[in-house]
Amino acid sequence: MIPAPIPADDAERLAALRQLLILDTPPEQRFDRIVEFATREFDQPKGTVTLVDENRQWFKARVGVEPCETDRATSFCGHAVTSHDFLVVEDARQDERFHDNPWVTAADPIVFYAGAPLVLPSGHVAGTLCVYGPEPRSFDAMDRAILGTLRDLCVEELLARQRGEATLG
């Protein structure tokens, strides 16, 4: 397993994340609905709006996932926040970064993962909108477009929430 790398600008990224004033807040329908739609659209049992903090990934919204946070070092989303590109792992068992990751070798493994980075206006990545499941899956350009649109809605909701606005829809 290759632990999630720490971006060179992580201190600034964390400051941008903390300015959202969202960490450790209760669930909100505005985010839950996006994750519910994404898991149905991609026929995956699990999905989250994940915010990557200093040592953990925290789930603002989650479907099929019990804990509200997990360790950053072993997380797929920890890898995803290092780039503005999607992180798509079609079969984690075949990926050197993840093949022996405890989430991949678990009884209920993560084999497929697709994460779209939540890029803030500052250019920093706060976390991801992601879907994942126990079976390998391809993820084509149309899939990326759909997840990207849902990701954009999620970022709009993060910013609206920060401004104190009601849900966008």
Image (tube, rainbow, N blue to C red):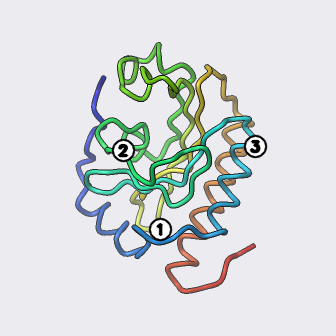
Q: Nearer the viewer, mark 3 or mark 1?
A: 3
Which is more toward the observer, 101 or 124? 101
**What amino acid does circle 3 point to?**
Arg
The answer to which of marks 1 and 2 sits earlier in the sequence is 2
Binning the other alpha carbons within 10 Å of mark 3 as few (below 14), some (14 to 19) or many (20 upward) gives few
Image quarter (top left, top right, bottom left or bottom right) of the C terminus:
bottom right
The answer to which of marks 3 and 1 sits earlier in the sequence is 3
User: Quick one: SS at disc 1?
Assistant: loop
Q: Is residue 13 above or below residue 101?
A: below
Which is more toward the observer, 7 or 90? 90
Q: Relative to residue 164, is residue 23 drawn left or right?
A: left
User: Quick one: SS at disc 2?
Assistant: loop
**In the image, what residue occupies the spot 50% across and 36% down?**
87
Q: x%, y% of residue 111? A: 53, 23
Q: Relative to residue 48, is residue 17 drawn left or right?
A: left
Q: Which residue is mark 2?
A: 82
Choose top left, top right, bottom left or bottom right for residue 19: bottom left
**In the image, what residue occupies the spot 45% across and 49% down?**
67
Q: x%, y% of residue 69? A: 40, 52
Binning the other alpha carbons within 10 Å of mark 1 as few (below 14), some (14 to 19) or many (20 upward) gives few
Q: Which residue is mark 1?
A: 121
Q: In whole angstroms, how far apart are the C-alphas of marks 1 and 2?
A: 16 Å
Q: Which residue is mark 3?
A: 40
Farthest residue, direction top:
94
Q: In whole angstroms, how far apart are the C-alphas of marks 2 and 3?
A: 27 Å
Q: In whole angstroms, how far apart are the C-alphas of marks 3 and 1?
A: 29 Å
**What amino acid does circle 2 point to?**
Thr
